[in-house]
Image (cartoon, helix red, strand yellow):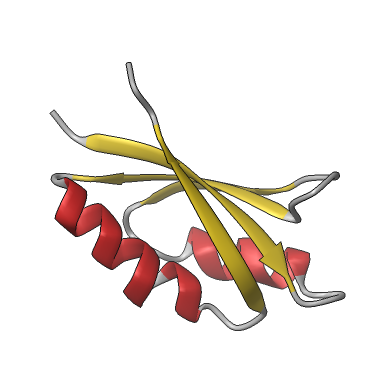
Amino acid sequence: MPVRAYVFIRALKGNAAAVAKGLSRIKNVKSAKVVSGRYDVVALVEAETIEELGNLVLKRVQRVRGVQSTETAIIAE
């Protein structure tokens, strides 16, 4: 069963839409939406293992141009 998580992203000022667009090009990102509030973008991601999920966030999501910081919440259902 795949591991799914929400990744809450703070973007550099004025970059939220570009970050969401960049994230949507990543294979394991199921959705990426610009939101209001504490975070600028929320992405739903999926991977086969926790290790793969960690690599996805560290090596792909955090490297999208305009991403300032991320916080990941693994879905527990």
What residue do we see at 25% from left, 66% from top?
55
Labels in figure, total: 0
Q: Position of residue 61 (x, y in %)?
A: 45, 68
What residue do we see at 52% from left, 64% from top?
23
Left or right of 25 on screen, residue 4: left
What residue do we see at 33% from left, 76% from top?
59
Q: Is residue 73 above or below residue 63?
A: above
What residue do we see at 31% from left, 63% from top?
56
- Residue furthest top as drawn: 77
Q: Position of residue 72 (x, y in %)?
A: 47, 49
Placement of the C terminus among the 4 image quadrants? top left
Q: Is residue 75 above or below residue 31?
A: above
In depth, the one of 65 and 21 nearer the eye is 65
Placement of the N terminus among the 4 image quadrants? top left
In depth, the one of 76 and 21 nearer the eye is 76
Left or right of 72 on screen, residue 36: right
Give the quarter of the image for residue 12: bottom right
Left or right of 47 on screen, residue 17: right
Q: Position of residue 15 (x, y in %)?
A: 77, 74
Q: Position of residue 31 (x, y in %)?
A: 52, 45
Q: Is residue 43 above or below residue 67?
A: above
